[in-house]
C-alpha cells in the first residue's frame, strides 16, 4: 500500500482529487496508473526537489526512476517541457485516434451497464457483448457494487473498473482535465470532442491501453496531428513551445520528436518489467500470465487481468487486439513497438542511454529550430514551410544583402572622392574605385590584358550576380577617346571576371569612357579611363611598380581624408580581401601608365 | 537496440531533409565572414544559424547606414547625372 501512496503522490500533478482517491486503490487497480505516475513524475521534474521523484526512486519504480534521474541531470527546463507535455497528451489525446481499433477491448473492461451507457455515447463503437460475462467475473466485489451508479452518473467514470473509491477521483480527475482543453482555446477540432462528455468518456476509456507498450508509437504515428493540437491545448500548463503555432514545420517536427523520444520508450520498457514483478506477490495470480498481460497489453488491462487472473481467453483477446493494433499502424510504428518490446525484455540500460541520447539530440534540435525561427523572421517575405527551402532563401538573401552592402559602399566610394578631392588629385581615386569590384575588375583586367599580359593570370574570386556598374552608367557616345573595338574583347574573355550578361549589351569601356574625360575635371572613373585610354594610345606597356607604390604614398600623404575613407571602407567591407586584391590588381594596371606615374611623381 | 531503432526512426522520415539541411547550413557558413566563426572546426548548426542571424542583422545595419550616406550624397553633391542615377539605383 505504500506503493499506492507513492503513486498517489505522483498523480497529484494531474489533479488534486487523484491524490486521495488513488491511495485507497487496491493493488489490482494500481498498475493502470503506473504510466500516469511515470508521466507525472516527468512533469514533476520541472520542480526540483519535490518529493514524488524522490519517492519514485525508493519505490517499486526504483529502476525506472533512476533512469529518469539520470536523464534529469542532462535536461534543462527547456527540454522537460516537451516531456511534460507529452504524457498529458498521451492520456488525453492518444486515445481518440485509437478508438476504432481499441474500442472492443476497452469495453470488455467495463461493466455491462457501463458498456451500455458508453455505447450510447460512442455510437461508432460496437458494444462488445461477448466480453461482458468476463467482465463480471473479473471485477472485484467492491468494484461491482460501486459500478451500478457510475455509468448512470457520469460517463467518464465508466472506464474505471477499479474499486468503489476510484470513480470519485477519476471523476474529478476527468473534471480537472476537462477545462484544460477549453482553456487552451486553440479552437481546433479535437477540443470540441474533448469538451463533450462523450468525448471525455472515450478519452478515459482509451486511456488504459495507450499506457502500454504501444503508447509511444501510437502517439507518435497515428495521432501526430491531434497531439500537436492538444499539446497546445494543455500547453497552458507547461510548454510554450508547443502552444506556439507559428512555425508549422518546427512544430510538427518537435511533436514528433517528443513523442518518439526515449522517455516513452523507456517507460514502456521499464513498466513492462516492473509491473508484473510488483503484482505477483500481492495478487497471487499466476505470475507468468500476469506478466504476459503486462507486457503484451496495457497496464490497466494487466492490472485487471491480474486481479481476475483466470481469464485466459480475455487476455488472449487483448493480446490479439494489440497485435492488430500495431499491425494497423505504420511501418515505423511497428518498428518502434518492436524495439520497445525488445528493450523491455533485454534490460533498461540501453533504453536509458537512448533516453539520454535522445534528450541531447532533442535539445540540439530545439536549439536549431529556435534559430531557424529567428532566421526566418529576419528574412522578408519568407513563407517557406520546410526548413530546406527556408535555408535556401536565407542563403539567397544573405548573398543579396552582401551584394547590396558591397554596391552601396562602392557607390559611396565612387562618389565621395570627387567631392573630397581637388581635381589634381584624381590619381588618388584609384583605391576607392577598387571597391567597385566588377568595374574595377573590368578595368584592371582590361588594362592588364591590354597592357601587360601578366595580370590576367592573377586569380580573382568570381563575383556571381554582380551586375552593377556598366549597364547602369549611361553610355554616352565616346568622345573621340572611345576604346578601340578590340580592347573590349579581352575583358570579357578574362576568366573570373564578372561582368553581368546584361552589361554586354553596353560595352563597359565605352560606357565608362562616355563619362566626362577631361583629366582635371572628370570624376574618378572617367579620369582613370582617360588615363587608360591615353596609355593605350601611347602604347606604353612597361611596368613600374615602384611608381605605383609612390602613387599609393601620394594618396596617403596627399589626402588623409580619402585615405581614412578608404581604410574605413576596407574594414567595413564584408569582402575586404577581394577588394584589396582588386585594388592591387588595378594599381598594377594603373602603375603602367607613364603619364599617371608622372603625375604622381609631380604631386609627391 | 532501442536507441538505434528509435533514433533511426525519428530521423528516418526526415533523413533526407536532415542531410539537405546540414548541407545548406554549411553553405550558409561559407557565406559568413571568417571572423564570425572559428572555422576549420565543425561548427554546430545552431551556432551557424545564430551567427547568420547576427550577420544578417549587421548587414541590415550596414545597409541602413550606407543608404543614409548615399542619400546625403545625393542631396548635397553636384555630381553628374550618371552618378546620381547610380546612387539612386543603389538606394532602391
Image: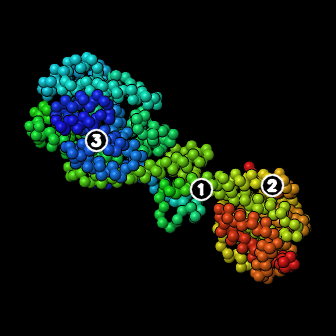
Indicate the chain on which mark 2 is placed: B
Q: Circles 2 and 1: CB distance less than 8 Å?
A: no
Q: Secondary structure at mark 2?
A: helix
- Residue at horizontal 31 percent and vertical 30 percent from the top: A16
Which of the pair A27/A339 is nearer the observer?
A: A27
- Residue at horizontal 67 percent and vertical 64 percent from the top: A571
Residue A501 is situated, as x and y percent measured from the top left of the image, at 71, 60
Give the side of residue B80 with respect to residue A502, left or right.
right
Residue A432 is situated, as x and y percent measured from the top left of the image, at 76, 66
Residue A547 visible within the image: yes
Q: CA distance from mark 2 to mark 1?
A: 26 Å
> Which is closer to the viewer, label 2 or label 3?
3
Residue A196, by quadrant, is top left
**Residue to which mark 2 is pinned:** B73
Q: Quadrant of the C terminus of chain A?
A: bottom right
Q: Residues within 10 Å of mark 2 (few under 14, many from 20)?
A: some
Residue B60 is situated, as x and y percent measured from the top left of the image, at 65, 52
Q: Secondary structure at mark 3?
A: helix
- The answer to whether dots 2 and 3 both sit on one chain is no
Question: Where residue A51 is drawn, which disc sits there?
Answer: 3
The numbered mark, 2 or 1, whose residue comes first in the sequence reads: 1
Question: Where residue B55 is drawn, which disc sits there?
Answer: 1
Indicate the chain on which mark 1 is placed: B
Which of the pair A531/A363 is nearer the observer?
A: A363
Q: Secondary structure at mark 1?
A: helix
Q: Circles 2 and 3: CB distance less than 8 Å?
A: no
Residue A183, by quadrant, is top left
> Which is closer to the viewer, label 1 or label 3?
3
Which of the pair A191/A324 is nearer the observer?
A: A191
Q: Residues within 10 Å of mark 3 (few under 14, many from 20)?
A: some
Q: Circles 1 and 3: CB distance less than 8 Å?
A: no
Q: Residues within 10 Å of mark 1 (few under 14, many from 20)?
A: some
Amino acid at each position: 500500500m505504500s506503493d499506492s501512496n507513492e503513486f498517489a503522490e505522483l498523480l497529484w500533478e494531474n489533479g488534486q482529487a487523484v491524490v486521495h482517491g488513488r491511495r485507497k486503490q487496491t493493488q489490482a487497480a494500481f498498475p493502470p496508473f503506473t504510466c500516469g505516475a511515470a508521466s507525472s513524475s516527468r512533469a514533476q521534474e520541472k520542480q526540483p526537489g519535490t518529493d514524488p521523484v524522490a519517492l519514485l526512486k525508493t519505490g517499486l519504480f526504483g529502476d525506472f526512476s533512476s533512469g529518469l534521474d539520470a536523464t534529469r541531470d542532462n535536461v534543462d527546463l527547456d527540454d522537460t517541457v516537451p516531456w511534460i507535455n507529452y504524457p498529458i497528451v498521451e492520456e488525453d489525446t492518444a486515445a481518440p485516434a485509437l478508438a476504432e481499433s481499441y474500442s472492443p477491448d476497452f469495453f470488455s473492461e467495463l461493466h455491462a451497464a457501463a458498456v451500455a451507457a458508453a455505447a450510447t455515447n460512442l455510437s461508432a463503437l460496437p458494444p462488445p457483448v461477448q466480453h461482458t460475462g468476463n467482465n463480471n467475473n473479473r471485477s472485484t466485489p467492491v468494484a461491482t457494487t460501486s459500478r451500478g451508479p457510475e455509468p448512470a452518473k457520469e460517463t467518464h467514470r465508466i472506464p474505471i473498473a477499479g474499486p468503489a473509491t476510484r470513480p470519485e477521483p477519476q471523476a474529478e480527475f476527468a473534471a480537472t482535465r476537462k477545462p484544460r482543453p477549453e482553456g487552451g482555446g486553440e479552437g481546433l477540432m479535437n477540443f470540441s470532442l474533448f469538451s463533450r462528455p462523450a468525448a471525455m468518456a472515450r478519452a478515459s476509456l482509451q486511456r488504459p491501453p495507450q499506457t502500454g507498450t504501444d503508447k509511444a508509437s501510437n502517439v507518435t504515428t497515428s495521432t501526430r496531428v491531434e497531439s500537436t493540437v492538444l499539446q497546445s491545448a494543455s500547453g497552458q500548463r507547461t510548454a510554450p513551445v508547443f502552444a506556439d503555432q507559428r512555425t508549422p514545420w518546427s512544430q510538427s517536427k518537435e511533436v514528433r520528436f517528443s513523442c518518439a523520444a526515449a522517455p516513452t520508450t523507456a517507460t514502456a520498457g521499464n513498466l513492462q518489467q516492473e509491473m508484473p514483478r510488483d503484482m505477483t506477490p500481492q495478487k497471487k495470480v499466476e505470475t507468468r500470465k500476469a506478466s504476459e498481460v503486462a507486457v503484451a497489453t496495457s497496464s490497466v488491462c494487466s492490472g485487471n487481468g491480474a486481479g481476475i487472473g483466470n481469464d485466459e481467453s480475455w487476455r488472449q483477446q487483448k493480446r490479439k487486439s494489440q497485435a492488430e493494433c500495431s499491425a494497423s499502424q505504420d511501418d515505423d510504428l511497428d518498428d518502434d513497438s518492436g524495439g520497445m518490446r525488445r528493450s523491455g525484455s533485454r534490460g533498461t540500460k540501453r533504453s536509458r542511454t537512448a533516453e539520454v541520447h535522445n534528450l541531447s539530440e532533442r535539445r540540439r534540435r530545439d536549439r536549431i529550430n529556435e534559430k531557424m525561427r529567428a532566421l526566418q523572421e529576419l528574412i522578408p517575405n519568407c513563407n517557406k514551410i520546410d526548413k530546406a527551402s527556408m535555408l535556401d532563401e536565407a542563403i539567397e538573401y544573405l548573398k543579396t544583402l552582401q551584394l547590396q552592402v558591397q554596391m552601396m559602399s562602392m557607390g559611396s566610394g565612387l562618389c565621395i572622392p570627387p567631392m573630397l578631392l581637388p581635381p589634381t588629385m584624381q590619381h588618388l581615386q584609384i583605391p576607392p574605385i577598387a571597391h567597385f569590384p566588377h568595374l574595377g575588375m573590368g578595368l584592371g583586367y582590361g588594362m592588364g590584358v591590354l597592357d601587360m599580359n601578366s595580370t590576367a593570370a592573377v586569380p580573382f574570386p568570381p563575383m556571381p550576380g554582380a551586375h552593377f556598374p556598366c549597364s547602369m552608367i549611361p553610355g554616352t557616345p565616346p568622345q573621340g577617346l572611345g576604346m578601340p573595338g578590340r580592347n573590349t574583347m579581352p575583358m570579357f574573355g578574362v576568366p573570373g571576371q564578372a561582368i553581368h550578361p546584361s552589361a554586354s549589351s553596353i560595352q563597359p569601356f565605352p560606357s565608362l569612357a562616355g563619362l566626362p574625360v577631361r583629366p582635371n575635371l572628370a570624376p574618378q572613373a572617367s579620369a582613370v579611363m582617360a588615363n587608360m585610354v591615353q596609355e593605350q594610345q601611347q602604347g606604353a606597356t612597361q611596368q613600374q611598380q615602384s611608381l605605383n607604390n609612390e602613387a599609393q604614398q601620394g594618396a596617403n600623404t596627399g589626402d588623409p581624408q580619402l585615405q581614412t575613407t578608404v581604410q574605413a571602407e576596407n574594414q567595413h567591407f564584408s569582402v575586404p580581401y577581394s577588394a584589396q586584391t582588386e585594388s592591387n590588381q588595378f594599381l598594377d594596371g594603373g602603375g603602367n601608365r607613364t603619364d599617371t606615374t608622372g603625375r604622381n611623381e609631380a604631386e609627391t | 537496440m532501442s536507441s538505434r531503432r528509435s533514433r533511426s526512426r525519428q530521423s528516418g522520415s526526415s533523413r533526407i531533409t536532415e542531410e539537405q539541411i546540414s548541407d545548406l547550413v554549411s553553405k550558409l557558413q561559407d557565406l559568413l565572414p571568417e571572423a564570425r566563426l572559428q572555422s576549420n572546426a565543425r561548427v554546430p548548426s545552431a551556432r551557424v544559424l545564430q551567427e547568420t542571424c547576427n550577420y544578417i542583422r549587421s548587414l541590415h545595419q550596414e545597409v541602413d547606414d550606407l543608404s543614409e550616406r548615399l542619400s546625403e550624397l545625393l542631396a548635397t553633391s553636384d555630381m553628374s547625372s550618371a552618378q546620381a542615377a547610380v546612387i539612386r539605383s543603389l538606394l532602391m
